Image (spheres, rainbow, N blue to C red):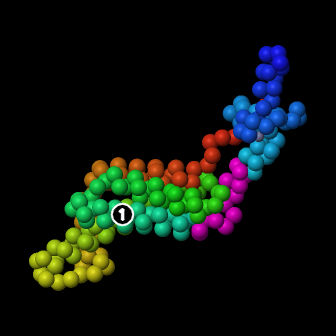
Amino acid sequence: MSELAAATLDARTCTQCAGAIDSYETRTVDQRPLCTRCADALAAALAAEKRLDGRLPMALAAGLTGAMLGAGIWAAVAVFARREVGVVALLVGWLAGAGVKRGAGKARGTFLQLGAAALSLVGLVTAKYFTFAHFFAEKVRIEQGISLGPFDPSILAAFPVAFHATFSIFDVLWALLAARAAWKGPAPSKVSLQRT
Ligand SMILES: [Zn+2]
């Protein structure tokens, strides 16, 4: 086989499945040629990403589940370490994003990303609440010998005050990192089909 023939053959080989490309097929992805079957599959996948269909409630429910799981881990780590370990915020964000992605089925996009980011923040506040509730109840138990439930009115009343009083630049930083991690979860594919 001449070099030219080899190059021609190479140019008409699908970069995804290595199958032969029909002469009429002009679609490429990142300037790499695709066979009709792969191009159709990619076009269908990209179209499916844009269709939210009725997946939003399921996506948000799964994202909330992820965020709450992350919040539980954050609170458990904080109780164990006896201080907040900020980097766990990344896990809360990642779990929120992964939950939304899973619940969304094939759908991807800004709506879902915004939902994931918002849920990651809900997760962070929830984690902070349970961490606070644990140490508040512990203090009351030691000082007054009284056992408080996690939703005791005195804890609910004291939390916003404590939240405000202890809020720092690190909270902003961890919130941003969590939201960014969540945002990536249901992000749309970066590839696009072109015609040459
Ligand atoms: Zn192919």
Residue at the outermost front position? 1
Q: Quadrant of residue 194?
A: top right
Q: Percent from the top left, x then y, of residue 137?
A: 21, 76
| Residue occupying the point 27% across, 58% down | 84
Residue at the outermost right position? 24
Is 22 placed above or below 2 here?
A: below
| Residue occupying the point 71% across, 55% down | 48
Q: Specify the amino acid type for callout 1.
A: Ile
User: In the image, which residues are magenta?
Assistant: 45-58
Q: Quadrant of residue 130?
A: bottom left
Is 125 placed above or below 147 here?
A: above
Q: Residue 175 or 165: which is nearer the viewer?
A: 175
The question of residue 53 being in magenta is answered with yes
| Residue occupying the point 31% across, 65% down | 76
In the rendered view, does 161 fall on the left or right side of 143?
right
In the rendered view, does 134 fall on the left or right side of 177?
left
Q: Which residue is under mark 1?
A: 73
Main secondary structure along the magenta-highlighted residues: helix
Q: Which quarter of the frame holds ligand 1?
A: top right
Q: Residue 149 or 152: which is nearer the viewer?
A: 149
The N terminus is located in which quarter?
A: top right
Q: Quadrant of residue 190?
A: top right
Q: Percent from the top left, x then y, of residue 196?
A: 79, 30
| Residue occupying the point 25% across, 72% down | 134
The question of residue 188 being in magenta is answered with no
Q: Percent from the top left, x then y, of residue 80?
A: 25, 63
